[in-house]
């Protein structure tokens, strides 16, 4: 599509030190780079500025947020509709970047799971089929079992931040143990993690949120970390709440679409006869076409949510209910083409 610059005015009021105010611009929920972002350097806490940025033809939701040491403002939102004579028949396809992490074989035998590693491999294989269809290219990286150390996962997080462009899509799949500390903060347990030393051996909520919030393209997290109590061993009494992190990820300033295997009070089931955990089994079926409820030859985020909700609940006889959170500013969009 053709792109042209638009100029959006805004006003800002700060009770704190004006010099400490930082501005962020998001388009359809993702970080944007304005060609110009003007705010007076010296102001008494009240000022007017403007943002100038390129927008493709069609409708876009632009959000401007102010951040200082005390927190983040509510977004100032603009709906911008651009039309023109040279409207392309379809949007240029970007690339898909997949990072799939699944840990069944932990260094500590009492942490072991059954199908988490296979779930990650199967998820990545399913999305690789979208090269030349929904996406120009698919770049998939998979870390399973003891490859998925804390250091290795951190390196791959940096890869996601660096390579995904504004027109691309990023998908992070994480299957393994997820735990909370005494303050309720969520941690993903890597292959070399220890539940007694979460702060120094696990991946904290802040790292996951910070990584995904900085990815420039549309970003989705698929999270499967609340496994059944009988398989937890030494972790059977650990907290496994994910709601706080999911809400933080989906906030306007982060803009991540989240699919989770279950609510924090439920357990994620896996059975050998299914070939995958319940969540991944239904997720893959949906991405392969069963979630195309409209018959238009594509599966969207909203359609996948509906299919997961019904399919996982039916498979587990109501014991497990997936969770879907889509941030304001991120419209329903196609994930795969059939």
Image: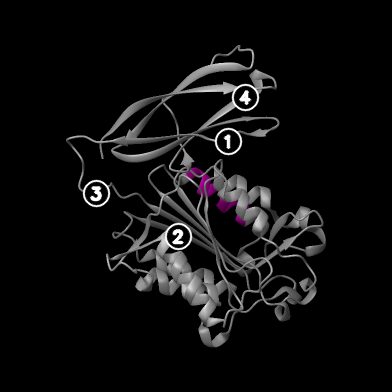
What's the mark number on residue 74? 1
Res. 130 image quadrant: bottom left
Q: Which residue is mark 2?
A: 140
Numbered disc 3: secondary structure: loop
Mark 4, Cα crowd under 10 Å, few <14 / some 14-19 / many 20+, is: some
Q: Quadrant of the C terminus?
A: bottom left
Using the numbered discs, state the Cα–Cα distance from disc 3 to disc 1 in whole angstroms: 33 Å
Is 80 part of what is drawn in magenta?
Answer: no
Q: Nearer the viewer, mark 2 or mark 1?
A: 1
**Vertical side of 120 occupied by 64: above or below:** above
Q: Main secondary structure of the magenta part?
A: helix
**Vertical side of 35 occupied by 81: above or below:** below
Looking at the picture, tell me which residue is in the foreground, 246 or 33: 246
Mark 2, Cα crowd under 10 Å, few <14 / some 14-19 / many 20+, is: some
Q: Please report the residue visible at 37 percent of the width from the left and 71 percent of the height from the top.
A: 288
Question: Along the polypeptide, which appears first: circle 4 or circle 3?
Answer: 4
Q: Please report the residue visible at 52 percent of the width from the left and 84 percent of the height from the top.
A: 274
Q: Nearer the viewer, mark 3 or mark 1?
A: 1
Using the numbered discs, state the Cα–Cα distance from disc 4 to disc 1 in whole angstroms: 14 Å
């Amino acid at each position: 599509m053709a792109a042209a610059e638009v100029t959006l005015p805004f006003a800002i009021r700060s009770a704190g030190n004006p010099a400490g105010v930082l501005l962020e611009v998001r388009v359809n929920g993702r970080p944007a780079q304005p060609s110009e972002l003007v705010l007076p350097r010296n102001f008494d806490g009240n000022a007017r500025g403007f943002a100038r940025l390129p927008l493709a033809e069609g409708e876009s939701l632009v959000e401007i947020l102010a951040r200082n040491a005390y927190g983040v403002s509510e977004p100032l939102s603009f709906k911008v509709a651009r039309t023109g004579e040279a409207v392309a028949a379809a949007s240029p396809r970007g690339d898909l970047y997949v990072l799939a992490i699944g840990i069944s074989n932990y260094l500590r035998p009492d942490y072991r799971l059954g199908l988490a590693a296979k779930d990650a491999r199967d998820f990545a294989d399913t999305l690789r089929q979208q090269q030349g269809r929904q996406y120009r290219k698919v770049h998939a990286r998979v870390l399973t079992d003891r490859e998925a150390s804390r250091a290795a996962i951190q390196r791959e997080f940096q890869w996601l931040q660096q390579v995904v462009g504004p027109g691309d899509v990023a998908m992070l799949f994480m299957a393994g143990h997820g735990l909370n500390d005494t303050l309720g903060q969520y941690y993903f347990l890597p292959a070399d993690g220890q539940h007694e030393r979460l702060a120094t051996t696990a991946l904290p909520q802040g790292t996951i949120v910070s990584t995904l919030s900085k990815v420039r393209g549309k970003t989705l997290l698929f999270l499967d970390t609340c496994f059944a109590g009988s398989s937890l061993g030494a972790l059977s009494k650990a907290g496994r709440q994910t709601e706080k992190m999911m809400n933080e990820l989906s906030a306007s300033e982060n803009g991540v679409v989240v699919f989770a295997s279950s609510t924090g009070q439920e357990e994620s089931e896996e059975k050998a006869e299914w070939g995958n955990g319940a969540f991944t089994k239904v997720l893959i079926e949906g991405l392969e076409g069963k979630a195309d409820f409209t018959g238009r030859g594509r599966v969207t985020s909203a359609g996948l949510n509906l299919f997961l909700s019904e399919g996982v609940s039916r498979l587990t006889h109501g014991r497990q209910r997936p969770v879907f959170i889509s941030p304001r500013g991120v419209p329903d969009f196609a994930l795969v083409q059939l």
